[in-house]
Image (tube, helix red, strand yellow):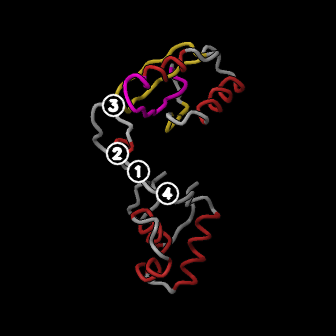
Amino acid sequence: MPARLDAIDWAILRELQADGSITNVELARRVGLSAPPCLRRVRALEEAGIIRGYRAVLEPKALGYEVICFAMVQLAAQGQADLAAFAAQMRDWPMVRECWTLSGETDFLLKCVAPNLGAFQQLVGHLTGLPNVRMVRTALALDQIKDEPIAPLDGAAPEA
């Protein structure tokens, strides 16, 4: 069930999504509050788990990661312990930037970065060599059409 948010909460979320480094004083000014109640609302949104954190959005290619790829991984066994073991390994691999469990034939979808095709091939080799991995299918990203790593906020909660 979505959290109950009022118009000011939605305004705070929109502003923080647009600029996570905004000062509380400026945020308060933009949403029409004084600084102390604005900070209380932000803290309440954090404590409720609605705001999970703040971070800078980096450009992978500017940092030398020329290859972005997706890997669809199918495990030989899908017991809870098997899924948890694979997920734990992926958390430790720096080139794996996102890891999702899926329904259907594919158990995991990985978004990976690599500095070059050789490093990408090594990553695939490591993946296919893991215990319990039945199959790995990969796709190299050619062009990014959309990158919106934020939740859509139109001022109202999504319809159920």
Q: Which residue is mark 1?
A: 58
Residue 29 belongs to magenta span: no
Q: Which mark is residue 141?
A: 3
Of the image marks 2 and 3, the number of the one nearer the N terminus:
2
Query: Which residue, given by chain and number where applicable, does mark 2 sit on?
Result: 62
Q: Is residue 86 left or right of residue 15?
A: right
User: Residue at the location (53% across, 15% down)?
Assistant: 128
Q: Is residue 26 left or right of residue 99?
A: left
Type of amino acid under label 3: Ala
Q: Quadrant of residue 113?
A: top left
- Determine whether label 2 and label 3 are within 8 Å by CB: no
Packing grade of label 3 (10 A; few <14, some 14-19, many >=20) is few
Q: Secondary structure at mark 3?
A: loop
Disc 4: which residue: 55
Dot 2 falls on a residue whose secondary structure is: helix
Choose the circle earlier in sequence order: 1 or 3: 1
Badge 4 vs badge 3, beta-carbon distance below 8 Å? no
User: What's the distance in space between the residues labelled 4 and 3, CA to CA?
Assistant: 24 Å
In primary-sequence order, the first of circles 4 and 3 is: 4
10 or 76: nearer the eye? 76
